[in-house]
Amino acid sequence: MSKPAIKTLGELKKENYISRGIKDELRQNLLKNIKEGKNSFEGIHGYEYTVIPELERAILSKHNINLLGLRGQAKTRLARLMVQLLDEWVPVVEGSELNDDPFKPLSRYAINLIEEKGDDTPIDWLHRDDRFAEKLATPDVTVADLIGDVDPIKAANLKLSYADDRVIHFGMIPRANRCIFVINELPDLQARIQVALFNILQEGDIQIRGFKLRLPLDLQFVFTANPEDYTNRGSIVTPLKDRIGSQILTHYPETIEIARTITQQEARKDGRGEEQIYVPSLAKDLLEQISFEARESEYIDVKSGVSARMSITAYENLLSTAERRALQAGDETTTVRLGDFTGMIPAITGKVELVYEGEQEGAASVANMLLGDAIKTLFVTYFPEIKKLEKQDQNNPYDPIIAWFFDQTDFQLLDDLNDASYKKMLDEVAPLQTLINTYQPDLDKKDQYFMKEFILWALVEFKKLSKYHMSEGMRFKDLYGSYISGL
């Protein structure tokens, strides 16, 4: 919808325009969406029965909101999507710095202009996309940044006394009048700055250098906070918490399916479609399982959280690793290999906070452990469990694979193998195909070679084979045969 053609206050009155506050806009537009069965938070997954109902109830109650959760839980994304619940266009007094409502002017400029011109007061229109303001709370944020301060240059230029309220330079919050205003990481805001928000939230009064201004600002506040911040860096002062209507707890995806959906939606693929780089379903699950393992790992600081961004950036690195390998090998198309997962280690090490034991192990080692743990977790969903202790006469479906490697001295899956050579190498291990045919007979043919490599890596994790990292790839050997050869 294009900008309305109304240009003056008189024309606005003739149209019988009804002015309403931002919280009423949000409430009434949300009610309309609920009646029509329309999703107000498109692109948010996993919150359908938890966070979103609570957020909608807070909006219907016209509350200011605090979203409390660990990093990478879509807190800011939720706040930005609230913009879509605003009216597409709202009228403002043209030239006003506080987005003055023509029917409820706040600033001296707008009040004087309407008194002077009446129905001829010029009107401009503000689109909902421009009604979102955001500030990251840092220790250096000042009251002047958020609320405002006296501007000596303005006083000098206009030859005004410091007692004249026209010397005030308004901060971000008054300038965001009639907007959604988000303060991220609220506990990082110094306590004295948080105190400055009290009256704005409750009464609409602001004080600047001795000026007490009655400005009933029309704002929807959304705060975000990390639970870790309450103990490590700061806290939300109690009177401010008391003025925030609803506190909503966010969380990480609860299933791999939801996590996959988020990663596929958010990852930048840069035109690399499935026809160019095919990613088997198991590879996508394995990538997400790494994040689930990280959130339970003894080497990672659980209180800091493991952001959903880790899976997103890791997936991008995975595609790039396969793309680079295919170009070097001269393949126009390729399928992601398990060996390509080593290329996403930098995306993992940069996204996790290690505890002391993790620091001792090293970030790269922890990342490789997470990959190993993810392989072990998913393997038992496809094939029989590998037990540590087994009876000698017990039939083991993995014995033919282990026996095949007993007679081999040099089985290598090198990074520079083209697709044809890679498949030929895996086809040589005939028992792998037999195992897949027995336990995964319906597996897509395009996924079979990734599954074969997955079985080899799993046998390594369960101490049935040995694997050696070489600069040019991986070498697999029989576990006990390698001991004998070393004697």
Image (cartoon, rainbow, N blue to C red):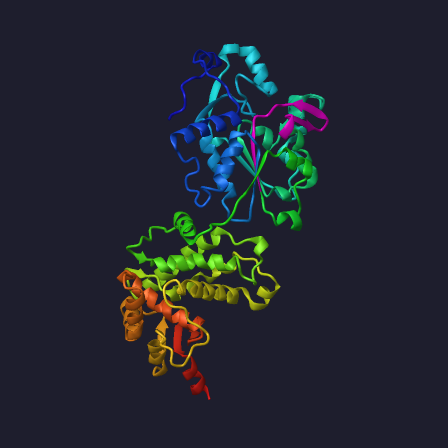
Along the line of sight, the residue nearer the viewer: 93 or 291 = 291
Residue 337 visible to the viewer? yes
Magenta run includes residue 443: no
Res. 443 image quadrant: bottom left
218 in relation to 463, above or below: above
Quadrant in which the N terminus is drawn? top left
429 in relation to 116, above or below: below
Residue 409 visible to the viewer? no
Magenta run includes residue 220: yes
Q: Is residue 316 left or right of residue 334?
A: right
Along the line of sight, the residue nearer the viewer: 171 or 469 = 469
Res. 286 image quadrant: bottom left
Q: Is residue 149 left or right of residue 278?
A: right
320 in relation to 215, above or below: below
Residue 350 image point, x, y percent: 52, 58
Along the line of sight, the residue nearer the viewer: 381 or 169 = 381
Looking at the image, which residue sits at the far bottom?
487
30 in relation to 328, above or below: above
Res. 165 image quadrant: top right
Along the line of sight, the residue nearer the viewer: 142 or 476 = 476
Residue 436 image point, x, y percent: 30, 67
Task: Give the magenta-colored segment's residue range.
Answer: 201-224
Residue 37 image point, x, y percent: 39, 33
